C-alpha cells in the first residue's frame, strides 16, 4: 500500500509542478521520487522473498534521506543521484530474479506470473532512470523547452505501469505463518532428494495442502520442516520441474478425478486450488495434452489420471 501511495503521490506532484506550475512543490520532487524505487524493492522482498523487519525496511530510507541532504547542500548532484537510485534498485530486482525458479512467499498457483511482473517493474525503474538522464541532457544542451513534455510523458507512463502491475494480486504473496526464510544448506545427494520427495508425496496425500489456492513454497516447506531451498532443489532435481509446476500437477490430477466423477470444469478448477481459468487451462493442457472440456466425464477403461505428473527426470 505504501508503494502504491508513493506512486500516486509522485504522479500528482509531477502533474502539479509540470502541468500547473506549482513551483513551491518542485524541491519536494527529488525526495518523493526516490521513495518509489526504495518502496518497490522493499515490497518485492517482503511480498515474495522473505518477511522484512521494520529495521530492515528502515535501512532503505537512506536513499531518500541522502537525496534530501544533497537537495539542501549540493542541489546540482540530484540529477545524478536520482537516476542512480532508480537504476540501482531496478537492476537489483532483476538480479534477484535471475535464475530464481521459486519465490518462497509467492502463491504457487500464480506460476511464473510474479517473476514476469517484477521483471517488468525492474525494467520500468531502469527506464525511469534513463528518462531522467535524457531530461538532464536536455537542460545541459539548452533544450529546456523539451523537458516539460519529457517529464510529464515519461513519469506518467512509468508510474502508471508501476502502479498497475504492482496492484496485480500475483505481484505479492499471502499472509501466513511463513516466518523468516531458513538459510539453505549445502546441496543434497540424490538419495536425500528421493527421501524428500517421498516425504512430500506422503504429506500431500494425507493433508491435501496442494488444494489450497494460497499455498506458498514457504508454507509447504515449513510444514515439512525443511528449508525452502532444500525442498525446491529436491523437487527440481527429482522431477525436472519447479515447485509451482509440481504442485499444479497434483492439482490437475485432482481436477481430472473430479471431472470424471461428473463435476463441471469450473467446479473442478475451484475445488483443485486454481483461481484463474487461464492458468487452469494452460496447466491442464500441459499435463494432459487436452483441454479440460475434452477430458471424459466417465471413463470405460482405467482412469488416465495415474499417468499425469509422472514424467519425472531419471536419476
Image (cartoon, rainbow, N blue to C red):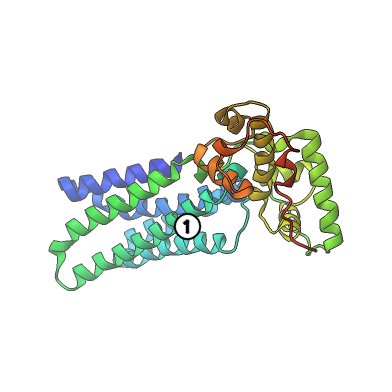
Left or right position of 148 against 198: left
Left or right position of 138 against 102: left
User: Which quadrant is home to the C terminus?
Assistant: bottom right
Residue positioned most to the bottom = 141
Q: Is residue 179 visible?
A: no
Residue 79 image position (x, y, % from top left):
31, 65
Name the element at disc 1. helix
Residue positioned most to the front = 300
Foreground of the two, 286 or 40: 286
Foreground of the two, 296 or 233: 296
Residue 72 image position (x, y, % from top left):
33, 59
Residue 306, placed above or below residue 70: above
Residue drawn at point x = 79 percent, y = 45 percent: 200
Residue 62, placed above or below residue 278: below
Residue drawn at point x = 71 percent, y = 41 percent: 305
Residue 1 image position (x, y, % from top left):
46, 39
Task: Tell me the quarter of the picture where residue 269 sits.
Answer: top right
Number of disc labels: 1
Residue of label 1: 119
Badge 1: residue crowd in 10 Å (few <14, some 14–19, many ≥20): some
Residue 117 image position (x, y, % from top left):
47, 51
Q: Is residue 300 visible?
A: yes
Left or right position of 281 against 162: right
Residue 268, placed above or below residue 285: above
Task: Tell me the quarter of the picture where residue 273 sits.
Answer: top right
Residue drawn at point x = 54 percent, y = 54 percent: 59
Amino acid at each position: 500500500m505504501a508503494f502504491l501511495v508513493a506512486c500516486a503521490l509522485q504522479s500528482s506532484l509531477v502533474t502539479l509542478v509540470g502541468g500547473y506550475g506549482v513551483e513551491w512543490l518542485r524541491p519536494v520532487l527529488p525526495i518523493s521520487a526516490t521513495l518509489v524505487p526504495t518502496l518497490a524493492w522493499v515490497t518485492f522482498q517482503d511480498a515474495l522473498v522473505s518477511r522484512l523487519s521494520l529495521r530492515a525496511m528502515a535501512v532503505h530510507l537512506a536513499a531518500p534521506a541522502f537525496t534530501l541532504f544533497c537537495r539542501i547542500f549540493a542541489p546540482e548532484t540530484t540529477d545524478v543521484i536520482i537516476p542512480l537510485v532508480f537504476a540501482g534498485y531496478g537492476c537489483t530486482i532483476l538480479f534477484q530474479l535471475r535464475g530464481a525458479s521459486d519465490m518462497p512467499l509467492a502463491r504457487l498457483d500464480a506460476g511464473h506470473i510474479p517473476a514476469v511482473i517484477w521483471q517488468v517493474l525492474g525494467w520500468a525503474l531502469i527506464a525511469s532512470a534513463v528518462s531522467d538522464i535524457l531530461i538532464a541532457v536536455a537542460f545541459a544542451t539548452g533544450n529546456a523547452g523539451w523537458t516539460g513534455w519529457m517529464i510529464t510523458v515519461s513519469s506518467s507512463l512509468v508510474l502508471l505501469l508501476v502502479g498497475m502491475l504492482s496492484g496485480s494480486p500475483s505481484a505479492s504473496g499471502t499472509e501466513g505463518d511463513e516466518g523468516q526464510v531458513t538459510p539453505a544448506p549445502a546441496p543434497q545427494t540424490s538419495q536425500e532428494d528421493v527421501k524428500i520427495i517421498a516425504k512430500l508425496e506422503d504429506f500431500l496425500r494425507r493433508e491435501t495442502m496442494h488444494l489450497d489456492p494460497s499455498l506458498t513454497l514457504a508454507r509447504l516447506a515449513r510444514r515439512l520442516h525443511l528449508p525452502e531451498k532444500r525442498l525446491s532443489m529436491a523437487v527440481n532435481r527429482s522431477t525436472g520441474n519447479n515447485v509451482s509446476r509440481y504442485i499444479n500437477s497434483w492439482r490437475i490430477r485432482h481436477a481430472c478425478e473430479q471431472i470424471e466423477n461428473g463435476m463441471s470444469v469450473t467446479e473442478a478448477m475451484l475445488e483443485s486450488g486454481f483461481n484463474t481459468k487461464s492458468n487452469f487451462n494452460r496447466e491442464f493442457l500441459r499435463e494432459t495434452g487436452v483441454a479440460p472440456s475434452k477430458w471424459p466425464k466417465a471413463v470405460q477403461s482405467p482412469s488416465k489420471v495415474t499417468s499425469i505428473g509422472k514424467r519425472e527426470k531419471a536419476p
